[in-house]
Amino acid sequence: MSKVKVIIVDDSALVRQVLSEILSADPDIEVVGVAQDPYIAREKIKQLNPDVITLDVEMPKMDGVTFLSNLMRLRPMPVVMISSLTEKGADITLQALELGAVDFVSKPKIDVSAGLDEYAHEIRDKVKNAARIKVNAISDRLVRKRSGIESLEVDPKLSADAVLSRRKGNKRFKTTDKIIAIGASTGGTEAIREVLETMPPDAPGIVISQHIPAAFSGPFAKRMDAASAMTVYEATDGQQILPGHVYIAPGSHHLIVERSGARYICRLNDGSPVNRHKPSVDVMFRSVAQNVGPNAIGVLLTGMGDDGARGLLEMKENGAATVIQDENSSVVWGMPGEAAKLGAADTELPLDRITAKLMALVKSQ
């Protein structure tokens, strides 16, 4: 198997050095070049033909988003953004994902070397995963739509049991309120946008867990609110779930759906990461399975790993309808693919047909 060839584009010499050391420590990755600005990067891409580039969002001479826009128009390829954990960094990164970047890694505000070292495992995984992504398909869809560091110890992978005990839901319990629960990871910010853009303003309440840093979830919710006819919030603890409204899990907490009398409310939980994620889709899906049961619809969109697959199965076992995104339209068919293997999905559909299916299920329930 050939190594993944990477070019690192960052105006900081320290970041270029640290990223080079982190990536080169993986035997499956070769850093073939570095560049301190987009103009040098452009020439090195032509010369070295990399499989993936990492791209700083904020650079002199030409910002990362402008460079990315030109790159995706002229030579589409997998790009992983290196983003600062600031509101400005979050907004630029979300723009980059809209333009076709496949993923991002957050750069710490202080002590960059130590901070990036902590994320070494994540950076390597995201770069190797990016190399397998079909960027031409992403680009085509965007056009149609818009015409020596050692390997670090990895935290143990916990299940939803670490946050919420499993119990049987009550399949016979019915209310008039329906809830749609959506989970996603890599590629999910744009997949969620595509679903929410086509949702009617009177759709059932929607809860969303997207793997995203805490600094990004607020700006992400604002962008989704601007794109959707529904009202979109970053969820708060105790917030009632109402029709026509969307509640996105903060990047620092699990989102749990609880019943309070005849109402459903959001609960935020600061428990351990589950499947190495907080928020975890498995945790949210389990809470929906137990507290909403057959009055819910579960949706698992594009994403790396398997978070949400077991939770979707629990929703199905408790009477909920379940839908997954198909492989061809997914940026990464990890999470929905695992759900398919478990038999957790009633329906598998391309992204552009999911909203219509959800509304048909709402009417039939």
Image (cartoon, rainbow, N blue to C red):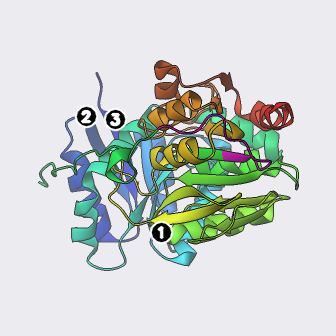
Q: Position of residue 139 (x, y in %)?
A: 67, 39
Vertical arrangement, residue 74 with respect to residue 332, above or below: below
Q: Earlier in the sequence, mark 1 or mark 2?
A: 2
Q: Assess whether mark 1 and mark 3 are in contact (beta carbons under 8 angstroms).
A: no
- Res. 28 mark: 2
Q: Amino acid at mark 1?
A: Ala
Question: Residue drawn at (27%, 39%), measured in percent from left and top?
Answer: 29
The residue lying toward the viewer, choosing from 61 and 102, is 102
Furthest toward the bottom, the residue is: 110
Q: Foreground mark, 1 or 2?
A: 1
Q: Please provide percent x and percent y for residue 307.
A: 44, 40
Could you tell me if the residues under marks 3 and 2 are in contact, i.e. CB atoms within 8 Å?
yes
- Looking at the rendering, in which quadrant would you find the C terminus? top right
Taking the magenta stretch, the answer to whether it contains residue 172 is yes
Q: Is residue 332 visible?
A: no
In the drawing, does residue 65 fall left or right of residue 361?
left
Viewport quadrant of the N terminus: top left
Q: Secondary structure at mark 2?
A: loop
Q: Amino acid at mark 3?
A: Val
**Up/down of 291 relative to 5, above or below:** below
Based on the displayed image, in which of its 4 quarters is residue 299 positioned?
Answer: top right
Give, as a three-letter code, the residue at label 2: Asp
Q: Disc 1 versus disc 2: distance between alpha carbons?
A: 30 Å
Characterize the local packing of mark 3: few (<14), some (14-19) or many (20 or more) Cα atoms within 10 angstroms. many
Comparing labels 3 and 1, the label whose residue is closer to the camera: 1
Residue, disc 3: 4
Q: What's the magenta bit mostly, secondary-structure-wise?
A: loop
Q: Which residue is mark 1?
A: 214
Q: Which mark, residue 165?
A: none
**Coordinates of residue 346 in the picture (x, y in percent):** 64, 22
